[in-house]
Structure formats: C-alpha cells, structure tokens
Image (cartoon, rainbow, N blue to C red):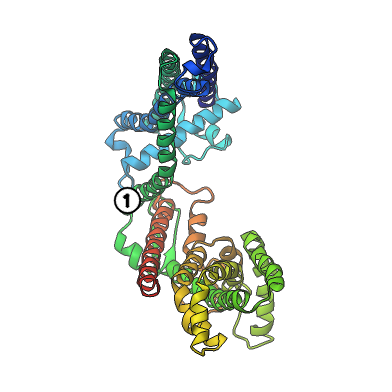
C-alpha cells in the first residue's frame, strides 16, 4: 500500500475518533457539560491523539529501521568476488539500490513486466539497456549478483511496506478504541491533551537538531566511503584537480587546495566590496538619515536580498564581465583575458551581500541604548566621535555576526561563481584569472552520467564535509568574538 494512503487512513481514523469521543462523553454526561472534568473538545482530542501519535511514531520508526534491515539482508547476498578491488560493499549496495529503483521505473513505464523484473536468470545486458532507456541512473552493465540482489531488495521492500501498513493501521484503530474508553465525564482529558501538546512542541523544537545531525551523518558516511578509495593526504594536500571518469578511481587527481583557494579568494573579494559599503550604509541610515529617507532607502537596499542568484550570475556574465574586459582587457590595460574571473564573481557577489551586512548592522546599531550616545555628547564628543568610539564598539558583536553571516553566504554561493568566475581549478594570485569554488565542483561532480560508485562522485561529499568544517570553525570564531566584546560592553 502506498505511504500516502497509509497516512490518509490514519488521519481519517483520528478525525473520526475525535468526533466519536465528543459524542460519547456527551452521551455519558447526558448533554450536561458541568458534569465533565474537561470540555468535550479535549475528550475528542484525547481520542485523536491516541489514534494518530502512536501510529505515526511507528510509521516513522518503521521507515527508519526497514532500510537498515533490508540493506543488511541484501548485503549478505553479495559475494566477495562481486566486489572490485577499487570498490567496497557499501558502493555495491548503492548500485543495488539504484538497480532496484530502475526496475520500479521500468515496470511503471511498461518497459518491463513484473515477471521479467523478478526473473532471476534474466539477460543482464537486456535489463541494463531497458533500465537506461527508462531514465534510471545505473552503471553501463549490471552484473548478475547486483541484479539478483536488486530483485531481493524490491521483494523485501514490498513485503515490508505491506506489513507496515497493516501494523500502523491496526495500531491507529487500537489507539482510537483506547481513547474512547476514556471518553467518560470523570476522565482528566484536558491534562492528557495538554501534556501531549507540550511533548509535541518539544519534538518540533528538536527537529532542527535532528536535521543537523542527519546532514552531518550523511556527509560523514559518504566521506568515509570516499577515503576508503582515495588517499586522504592526496585529497587535502593535492594541488591539482583533474577528475577522470575512465573507470573507478582511474588516474584522477582530486586535490582540494585549488578549490579552497578559489572559494576563499572570491569570498575575500566579495567581502571587500560588501563590508565597507554595507557598514557605511548602515551607519548612515541609523545615525544620519532622516526618517523619510530611511523609510525609502532601507527597503530599496533590501530589494537586493530578494533577487535570485541566477540573475546575479547573468548580470556578472553579460554586464560586469564585458565591462571589466573593456577596462582591463586588450583595449585597456591588457591584463584581463576574459570576462569570467575572480574579480567578476567577487564584485557581483559583494553587491549581493550588501543587504546582509547593512540590514543586520543597521538593526544592531539602532539597538545600542540612546543613553550611551547622550553620555558621549554630554562629555563633549562630536557625532562622528560618538559613532566611532561608542556606538560601533558597543555594536561590534552584532556587526561581527553580520559579517560572518555574509562570509558564510559567500562561501556557499554557486550560481554566481559558475557564471562569473569560470570553471578552472588553479592556484593563482591574479584576480583576473578564471577560478572555481568548492560548491561549483560539488554540483559538477554530481551532475551528468557519472558512476556514483566512483571516487569522482563520492568526492562531492568529501568536499561538502570540508566546507561544513570550515563554516563551523568560522561560526565558532564568531561566537568567541561576540562573547568577548559582549562582556566588555554589557
């Protein structure tokens, strides 16, 4: 049974239980609400919660545990002889999953019948061709062990989904009956419902933490798979980036240093543009601008934050790049060969980051108590001296946070880099050279007909993990600065 139908059935049982609970308690009370401990809605809510919450909890737990059980069962079917020296059991399992998904797609599109998809001695060449024709992402030739494991994978998932639907719906019905037993006037339904709502709010607050944990774990496991196939020392200290998809591993050079250098170089140029302009704009809007000018200028400035990054990328490619070439190119100073360069992407990215710096800094500067300004004026300081020696130091923790937010945004930018900086991975100090970044290469490594079991595709997760660690260190440093100066000016 499809997952959506299971969800809708449980939801229907919960809604029906809600109305049944209200009617039952009103019947027991003879329609007199004064005889009830709680309002009728609480009794109905008690039935709905007991029907839906355990069932949905079982559904989520089943969806999390079933893949682990299925993968463990299928992994035992793969002989060691089917695992190449440059591969691993985890990578072969990923091929099995893709083959199983491809079989589902082929059956759904009519390219394969269900009997053909289950045939254990089917022609792997014919199966591979039909899966690729159906749009499945599989290797050029599926091996017999992978095909048999994929068929077993489909069978186990089908059986698991059937038993899951039976268990979840049965638990929802049992929970509704359990809730209906409490639909009597003396039952403290309000206490039960309010406790359940409190735990629901705790769960909602935990989603962000669990999501972060899930992101980190997904990066960690795939990064470990990559480093089993490619030396970590060559990755972190290599100065050449030349991925090759000619076989697993091939003769690729996957040194990350050129990508990190391009990422930091473009981000530094962008921050060199965004920080002074954004900070000066924030100081003007908060300290010098009249209310009328501020009401017009600030919304116009914040419009920059709502422009899609692809539009900025096109602006860099079609306007800023040719303009810089006309100034620094052959007809100008002769030091710029093409419009795609570090300075092109950096300038446009800096324009994009101006609202991040200006808007946050403006709010932070406005939050500085007016009494601090008045005390400075009372001591004879001018307006500019007050801003420089009182307001900015007091607002420094927040300004640092705004700058670090802009830096994280710059490091994670992709489209402006792809269109404005080029795709060359190189170590160069020349801002007029084309370069690329970590995020751009993550996209390119996971795009196309690449073998996803190869280190050239898994390297995207290692790049993502590297970027995650860098931004985490950046945030820790920002927290240190904020705490240090907050203690000084609180």
Classify 10 Å Cα crowding around label 1: few (below 14), some (14-19), many (20 and above).
some
Q: Position of residue 12 (x, y in %)?
A: 54, 20
Q: Which residue is mark 1?
A: 224
| Residue 479 seen in this snapshot | yes
Q: Nearer the viewer, residue 238 or 376?
A: 376
| Residue 429 seen in this snapshot | no
Does 469 sit above or below residue 435? above
Does 207 sit above or below residue 283? above
In the rendered image, the residue lying farthest to the front is: 34
For mark 1, give the secondary structure.
helix
In the rendered view, does 231 fall on the left or right side of 96?
left
Q: Position of residue 217 (x, y in %)?
A: 36, 47
The residue drawn where x is 34% and y is 50% is 220
Q: Nearer the viewer, residue 29 or 25?
A: 29
Q: Position of residue 69 (x, y in %)?
A: 33, 29
Q: Nearer the viewer, residue 82 or 159?
A: 159
Q: Quadrant of residue 237?
A: bottom left
In the rendered view, does 469 fall on the left or right side of 337?
left
Q: Position of residue 269 (x, y in %)?
A: 53, 76
The residue drawn where x is 44% and y is 51% is 457
The residue drawn where x is 65% and y is 79% is 324
Does 385 sit above or below residue 152? below
Q: Nearer the viewer, residue 277 or 253?
A: 277
Q: Say which quadrant the C terminus sits in.
A: bottom left
The residue drawn where x is 42% and y is 45% is 211
């Amino acid at each position: 049974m499809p997952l959506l139908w299971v969800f809708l059935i449980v939801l229907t049982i919960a809604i029906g239980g809600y109305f049944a609970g209200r009617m039952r308690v009103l019947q027991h009370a003879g329609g007199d609400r004064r005889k009830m401990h709680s309002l009728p809605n609480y009794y109905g809510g008690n039935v709905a919660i007991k029907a839906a919450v355990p069932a949905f909890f079982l559904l989520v737990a089943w969806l999390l545990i079933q893949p682990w059980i299925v993968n463990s069962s299928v992994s035992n079917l793969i002989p060691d002889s089917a695992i190449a020296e440059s591969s691993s059991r985890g990578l072969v399992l990923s091929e099995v999953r893709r083959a199983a998904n491809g079989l589902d797609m082929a059956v759904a599109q009519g390219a394969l019948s269900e009997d053909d998809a289950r045939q254990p001695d089917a022609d792997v060449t014919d199966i591979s061709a039909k899966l690729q024709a159906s749009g499945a992402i599989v290797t050029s030739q599926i091996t017999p062990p992978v095909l048999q494991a994929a068929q077993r994978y489909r069978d186990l998932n089908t059986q698991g989904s059937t038993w899951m639907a039976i268990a979840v719906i049965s638990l929802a019905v049992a929970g509704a009956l359990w809730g209906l037993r409490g639909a009597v006037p003396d039952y403290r339904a309000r206490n039960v419902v309010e406790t359940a709502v409190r735990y629901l709010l705790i769960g909602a607050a935990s989603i962000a933490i669990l999501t972060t944990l899930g992101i980190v774990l997904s990066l960690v496991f795939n990064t470990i798979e990559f480093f089993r196939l490619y030396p970590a020392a060559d990755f972190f200290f290599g100065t050449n980036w030349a991925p090759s998809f000619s076989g697993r591993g091939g003769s690729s050079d996957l040194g990350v240093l050129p990508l990190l250098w391009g990422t930091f170089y473009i981000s530094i140029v962008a921050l060199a543009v965004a920080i002074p302009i954004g900070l000066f704009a924030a100081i003007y809007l908060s300290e010098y601008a009249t209310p009328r000018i501020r009401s017009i200028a600030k919304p116009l400035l914040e419009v920059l934050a709502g422009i899609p990054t692809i539009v900025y990328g096109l602006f860099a490619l079609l306007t800023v790049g040719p303009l810089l070439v006309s100034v620094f190119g052959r007809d100008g100073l002769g030091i710029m060969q093409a419009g795609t360069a570090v300075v092109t992407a950096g300038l446009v990215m800096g324009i994009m980051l101006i609202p991040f710096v200006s808007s946050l800094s403006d709010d932070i500067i406005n939050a500085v108590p007016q009494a601090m300004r008045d005390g400075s004026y009372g001591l004879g300081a001018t307006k500019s001296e007050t801003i420089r020696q009182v307001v900015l130091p007091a607002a420094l923790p927040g300004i640092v946070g705004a700058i670090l937010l802009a830096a994280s945004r710059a490091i994670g930018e992709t489209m402006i880099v792809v269109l404005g900086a080029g795709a060359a991975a190189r170590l160069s100090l020349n801002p007029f050279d084309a370069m690329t970044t970590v995020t751009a290469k993550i996209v390119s490594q996971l795009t196309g007909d690449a073998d996803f079991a190869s280190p050239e595709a898994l390297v995207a997760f290692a790049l993502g993990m590297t970027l995650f660690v860098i931004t985490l260190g950046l945030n820790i440093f920002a927290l240190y600065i904020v705490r240090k100066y907050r203690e000084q000016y609180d």
